[in-house]
Image: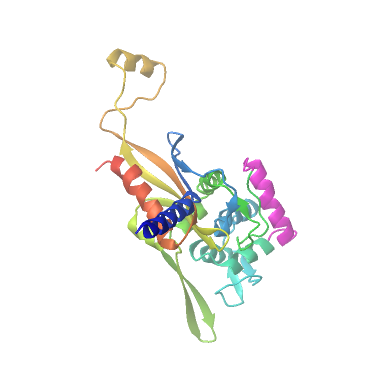
């Protein structure tokens, strides 16, 4: 019996150690307040969260989404080799996390893939992402590294690009290809479909997975939340009004933006459960009916 208890204790300690390796972050951007943090400064592989930076660097170069580019399958892809509009490539990259689409977007940059990766690292420096480094545009390389804290800033920046916001949260999309006299369709199912179907008002979303990185997700969500009760009497609020300070009316809602980052989850369920825990216990419980 004592031996069994010892074994159970060792297994439990191992599970706790594994749990502590996770990086989890919840940040209220509206209040500029960290709500929850766990290992947020731990440098670890990024996996396909990389594609948020790939999208930003490409859009900084060219916002024309109708221009066609020849697919360069330098990595795994479900796309047949042909020309695609940049919009189609962005859909494949941000919705289904297609690596070939990411490589094609990088190769389209002036000077090619090497210049693109240099631009990714330069943008990371400009953004103050001191623990972030990119070796490729897809996230397949274990050398693509960051921290949950840096990823928070990355998904926040990505959320300022309308194309990334609109594309990354589509639950699914279709690319139609003309093949001889027939039309072939490629279905793009979002790699974060479970959370996108469960929660409304996710405004930016990207998942990632490689063996070194584990299962990752970065999201920004928007919620109408209860406004805090004013802590001043009527005279104090009148003084604030005449001084041009914003007033908060009791009962009125305030739009809050929250960033959620999970890195290093052991499986997809673990990743989803971490987000659900934050959503239900830290965000939705403060939502206006």
Judge whether residue 161 can be spotted in this image. yes
Which quadrant of the figure contains the C terminus?
top left
Q: Quadrant of residue 58?
A: bottom right
Judge whether residue 287 can be spotted in this image. no
Horizontally, residue 275 falls left or right of residue 167, namely left
Residue at 37%, 47% (x, y): give it.
Answer: 278
Q: How many marks?
A: 0
Q: Nearer the viewer, residue 225 or 144?
A: 144
Horizontally, residue 241 falls left or right of residue 118, namely left
The spot of residue 112 in percent (x, y) is: 73, 61
- Give above or below for 42 relative to 192: above
The spot of residue 282 in percent (x, y) is: 35, 42
Looking at this view, name the residue that lies furthest to the bottom: 181
Give the colouring mode of the picture.
rainbow
Q: Quadrant of residue 131?
A: top right
Q: Nearer the viewer, residue 266 or 229?
A: 266
Region rendered in magenta = 109-130
Residue 127 shown in magenta: yes
Residue 122 shown in magenta: yes
- Give above or below for 81 relative to 210: below
- Give above or below for 57 relative to 240: below
Residue at 58%, 70% (x, y): give it.
Answer: 84
Residue at 41%, 16% (x, y): give it.
Answer: 243
Residue at 61%, 67% (x, y): give it.
Answer: 68
The spot of residue 150 in percent (x, y) is: 57, 44
Looking at this view, name the residue that lies furthest to the right: 111
Which quadrant of the figure contains the N terminus?
bottom left
Q: Quadrant of residue 110?
A: bottom right
Q: Nearer the viewer, residue 229 or 2?
A: 2
The spot of residue 119 in percent (x, y) is: 69, 51
| Majority SS type along the magenta span | helix
């Amino acid at each position: 019996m004592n031996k069994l208890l010892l074994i159970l204790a060792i297994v439990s300690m191992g599970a706790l150690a594994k749990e502590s390796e996770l990086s989890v972050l919840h940040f209220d951007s509206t209040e500029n307040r960290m709500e929850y943090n766990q290992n947020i400064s731990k440098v670890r592989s990024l996996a396909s969260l990389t594609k948020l930076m790939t999208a930003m660097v490409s859009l900084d170069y060219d916002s024309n989404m109708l221009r066609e580019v020849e697919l360069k399958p330098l990595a795994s892809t479900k796309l047949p080799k042909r020309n695609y509009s940049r919009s189609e490539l962005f859909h494949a990259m941000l919705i289904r996390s297609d690596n070939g689409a990411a490589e094609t977007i990088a190769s389209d940059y002036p000077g090619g893939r090497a210049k693109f990766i240099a631009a990714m690292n330069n943008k990371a420096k400009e953004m103050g992402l001191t623990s972030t480094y990119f070796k490729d545009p897809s996230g397949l390389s274990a050398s693509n590294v960051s921290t949950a804290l840096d990823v928070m800033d990355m998904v926040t920046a990505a959320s300022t690009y309308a194309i990334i916001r609109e594309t990354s949260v589509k639950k699914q999309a279709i690319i139609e290809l003309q093949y001889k006299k027939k039309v072939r369709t490629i279905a793009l199912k979002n790699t974060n479909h479970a959370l996108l179907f469960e929660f409304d008002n996710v405004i930016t979303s990207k998942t990632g997975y490689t063996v070194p990185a584990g299962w990752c997700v970065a999201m920004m969500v928007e919620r109408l939340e209860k406004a805090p009760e004013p802590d001043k009497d009527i005279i104090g609020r009148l003084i604030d009004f005449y001084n041009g300070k914003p007033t908060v009316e009791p009962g009125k809602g305030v739009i809050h933006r929250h960033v959620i980052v999970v890195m290093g989850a052991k499986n997809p369920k673990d990743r989803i459960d971490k987000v659900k825990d934050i959503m239900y216990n830290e965000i939705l419980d403060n939502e206006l009916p």
